[in-house]
């Protein structure tokens, strides 16, 4: 049944929601890149039901914000549930956060992202003599 499989359309909608959250909170591009990375890594490990994807993506956003945004406001689970409209409770969000971290073996901070690659590539080019 296709209703029980996360498709690229579902993924793209979840990523767009994470992008909107990053814009709303004024977070760095690295926060968004890491959130997408976490979502993709999780979806590569587990079969998620599409109805849980908004909660999963909100959690990936929250984990990323906690990892990257050290000196800015991090939303509470209650606020994020309301803003993301993920349909669960703040307790559901916190349980999902723990599940995601466990599935990813707590490998959050050192995730390679396309943004990190571009930053490293830019540094390499800037250091080259013309």
Image (cartoon, rainbow, N blue to C red):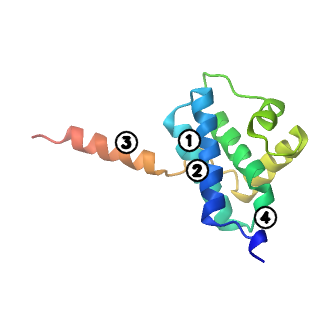
Q: Quick check: 97 left or right of 41?
A: right
Q: Where is residue 3, by image quadrant?
A: bottom right
Instruction: Tell me which numbered mark, 4 or 3, is placed earlier along the sequence.
Output: 4
Residue 49's label in the rendered image is: 4
Residues at badges 2 and 4 in contact (C-beta under 8 Å)? no
**In this view, the mark in front (3 or 1):** 1
Secondary structure at numbered mark 1: helix
**In this view, the mark in front (4 or 3):** 4
Residues at badges 2 and 1 in contact (C-beta under 8 Å)? yes
Look at the image and tell me whether residue 10 can be seen.
Answer: yes
Residue under label 3, please give it. 119
Residue under label 1, please give it. 32
Q: Where is residue 9, by image quadrant?
A: bottom right
How far apart marks 4 and 1 lie (CA) works out to: 22 Å
Residue in view at x 53 percent, y 45 percent: 33
Q: Quick check: 95 left or right of 5?
A: right
**In this view, the mark in front (2 or 4):** 4
How far apart marks 4 and 3 lie (CA) works out to: 34 Å
User: In the orientation shown, which residue stands out farthest toward the bottom?
Assistant: 1
**In this view, the mark in front (4 or 1):** 4
Instruction: Tell me which numbered mark, 4 or 1, is placed earlier along the sequence.
Output: 1
- Where is residue 16 shown, x and y percent of the image? 60, 47
Residue under label 2, please give it. 36
């Amino acid at each position: 049944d296709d209703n029980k499989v996360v498709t690229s359309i579902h993924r793209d909608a979840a990523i767009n929601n994470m992008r909107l959250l990053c814009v709303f909170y004024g977070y760095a591009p690295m926060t968004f890149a890491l959130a997408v990375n976490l979502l993709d890594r999780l979806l590569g490990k587990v079969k998620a039901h599409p109805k849980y994807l908004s909660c999963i993506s909100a959690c990936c956003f929250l984990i990323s914000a906690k990892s990257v945004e050290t000196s800015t406001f991090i939303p509470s689970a209650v606020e994020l549930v309301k803003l993301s409209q993920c349909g669960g409770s703040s307790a559901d969000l916190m349980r999902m956060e723990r599940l995601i971290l466990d599935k990813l073996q707590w490998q959050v901070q050192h995730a390679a992202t396309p943004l990190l690659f571009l930053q490293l590539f830019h540094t390499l080019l800037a250091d080259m003599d013309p």
